[in-house]
Image (cartoon, coloured by chain):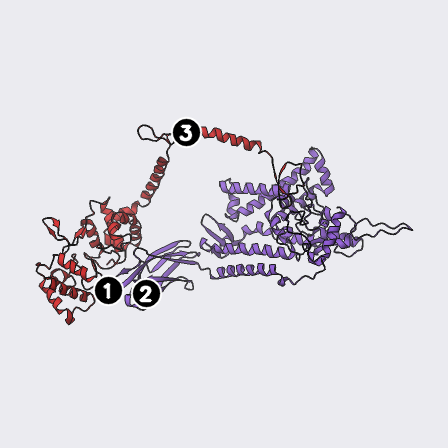
Amino acid sequence: MTTENQSTHQEASHTASVLDEMDTSNKNLQNIGVELLPVHTGGTVHAKRIGGKFRTFKWWAASFWIILFVGPYLRWDGHQAILFDLPNRQFHVFSMTILPQDIWILAMILLFFALLLAASTAIAGRLWCGYFCFHTVWTDVFTWIEEKIEGQPNKRMKLDEQPMSFSKLKVKVPKHIIWLIIGFATSFSFVAYFVDAFDLWSRLFSFEWGATETTIILVLGLATYFFAGILREQVCIGFCPYARIQGAMYDTETVVPTYDNERGEPRGRMKRAKPGEEAPKLGDCIDCNLCVAVCPTGVDIRLGQQFGCITCGLCIDACDSVMEKIKKPKGLIRYASLSEFAGKELPAIWKRPRVIVYSGIMAFAAGMILWGLATMSPMDVKALHERAPVFVQMSNGNIQNKWVMKVVNKGNMPMAAKITVEGPEGLEYNLDRHILDIAPGNLGSTTLFVRIPRKQLEGASTPILIRVVDENNPQVVETYETVFIGPEKR
Amino acid sequence: MALHNPWPDEGNTGHIWDEDLRELDNPPPLWWMLSFYAGFIMIVFYALYYPVIPLTDGTGEHTKGMAGWTQVEEYKDDYKVLKDWRKAKFADKEEKLASMSVDEILKDEDLKSYAVATSKMLFGDYCAACHGAGGQGNPNFPVLADDDWLWGGKAAQIQASITNGRIGNMPARGMMGNLTDEDISNVADYVIALSEGKGNDASVAAGKAVYTKGMCLACHGPAGKPLAPAGAANLTDQVWRFSSNRDEIINVITNGVNVKKNGVYVAGTKQAVMPSFKERLPNADVNIKRLAVYVHSLGGGQ
């Protein structure tokens, strides 16, 4: 790091915002003060693993993904509890069956999680990347296995440099086999959400997988192995679009793992002053480089915010352990925002515009999901109005309209749908079938004729209400508002 | 895009985004280039094998590829598979349609909806030109979706109408042809009053007398309602065969319906002929039943 860089950092920490005193009219990167920080591109990053608060939290967060492997074996009412049955176009989630008609709820779920990502990023940086992202978690587990088999980073680096030999293979092959098994378990579990898990197992041993299943399991399994085992941090740095997008969600109030430049610099080894000499004035950073050694993406946090940083907090663990040893206060590297270093007080979370807007949209999406699930009926009713003719004059002067009624049974039980019609006085109706017997997942249809005396009609269109009740389960009621078309009033 | 290029020697194009995303000028991999050239070789064989050249030979036939394959042949083959499948799947239903009477078909819910579903195209091809796509009628052509029937609205009667056709007859100026213009004007008022339910009012008494004088009751019935469905309109209901317009009513009474002289229609007479379909329809035996069920279910079957 050059002295020039250091001074830039110190200046920045005294101003209100890093952008306040910069000429932003020219968007040339150098001109707006963007430093080109190095990212690790040479060889595998072999990060040291040490314990600490954030290490523990990372394991807890990672254990969330155990659900992926366990989920397909949960049963509910004799079928798989969570099954996305694409061929039959129905999703089973415990007692719920979601048919394509309700798929808008999925859009709301996606919106909710997209905004959850945005809101959490605005508050505390790349929480998703650092703790929850499947790539981070899988890479973490893969490197943990690597350490168990090959040893500490320095040993691994030495092993990598050795020419290929039998003894090297003896260490490397088991590692790759375990990685491949995890890759297979991952892709198998994924596919097991789309076809019955036990069925998939039994067909594996009789070699009866279909082409689609085989392709997805092989490709996804190998991709898991390749991404988490070989590519690792290069995925975050070079491939992942979220990594770039999330940086744009930061502001000066976002707390991220940050090196306290003022306290740490000038860094240097602690030396006892020789008699007669003045002890050099040093900051708290002893330049031990442990924060770099533990970083899974190989960045140097002391250079400041950078997109190579996935904010996993491992450097905080590392630095705190060192500060403890040299008896200095912890927190030389800590979760902090740019405003904090500028001496500004952080506004309360609920007073920040980003948080308000993000959580507003989240609340909307959550409300829609709840409303959708609460009002989701096992019955779907459509009434298609006949267009040629839209209405017919009958011999006694009544006007007749015709509908084709379609009732879908989205539930698991047979349905006896009884159709009734309400409207102005004198309304009569008849149906081909008054009660439709519909098997689960099927559609029943009938023709509906409605007749209304002409004098009862207000004008060209009169609202009427079609009510469908499941006689087998009378609390299932759907109403369909439609209009009865008649001649223009003369 | 940055003006400053921190990697001047790596052969990038100078296009740099987001600090370090940069476009390099590497040649495509060998396997990619090989498949690119293989594509050129492939197209030669493709052109020989398939009908590629957009010209015709002397006889008007298109130029065929070596394989003799054509898209339309493939379509026809596929369509035949579908047709055979359909025929096999619905063979029992078709058999039932052939053996059962229309009334029996109407009682069998399943068979009825099958007959209705398979009639839509037939109705569109053979009936809709006059009666409208949904049986809504056209000027001078009767509505099939209402409950007013000249020849009867029972399924068997509808079947008979389709099979043999129907030709209505109404003589000009009454049965004897003896009504004057004034008589006709009076009887028109009476007919309109009948439809409105005011047939016994004093104001139309003159028309009522003409109704008897012109022997209208012979077909239209003594009270304006035919005793049996035989082509004469019911004058007491609200559906008009031709028009509810008074001038048009007078015109019909004056010139009649289907009035011919020496085999030629008289000027001004209404021409209203339903042709017989037993020769026109393919597979008429079954298809007429099918259509009778369809028309019966349009909205006014009895």
Task: Mark 1 and mark 3 in contact? Answer it, CB < 8 Å.
Answer: no
Q: Which residue is mark 1?
A: A396
Q: Quadrant of the N terminus of chain B?
A: top right
Task: Report how far apart the C-alphas of labels 1 and 3 lie in the structure.
Answer: 69 Å
Q: Of residues B122 and A183, which is closer to you in this image?
A: B122
The reply to whether residue A183 is visible in this rendering is yes
Identify residue type, mark 2: Gly
Local SS, label 3 = helix
What amino acid is labelled 3 in the image?
Answer: Tyr
Q: Is residue A132 left or right of residue A209?
A: right
Callout 1: few (<14), some (14-19), or many (20+) C-alpha neighbours within 10 Å? some
Q: Indicate the quadrant where residue A482 lies.
A: bottom left
Dot 2 and dot 1 within a common chain? yes
**Circles 2 and 3: CB atoms closer than 8 Å:** no
Q: Does residue A195 appear left or right of residue A41 in this picture?
A: left
- Residue with the mark numbered 3: B49
Q: Secondary structure at mark 2?
A: loop
Q: Amino acid type of disc 1? A: Asn
Residue at left offset 16%, top offset 56%: B231
Q: Position of residue B52 (x, y in %)?
A: 40, 31
Badge 3 crowding class, 10 Å Cα cut-off, few under 14, some 14 to 19, many 20 or more, is: some
Q: Chain of mark 3?
A: B
Which residue, as the protein is rendered here, is positioned at the far bottom? B202
Mark 2: few/some/many CA within 10 Å (<14, 14-19, 20+): some
Which quadrant of the view contains residue A111? bottom right
Alpha carbon separation for disc pair 2 and 3: 66 Å
Considering depth in this image, is A43 or A79 the residue closer to the camera?
Answer: A43
> Which residue is labeled 2 in the image?
A459
Residue A190: numbered disc: none
Q: Chain of mark 1?
A: A
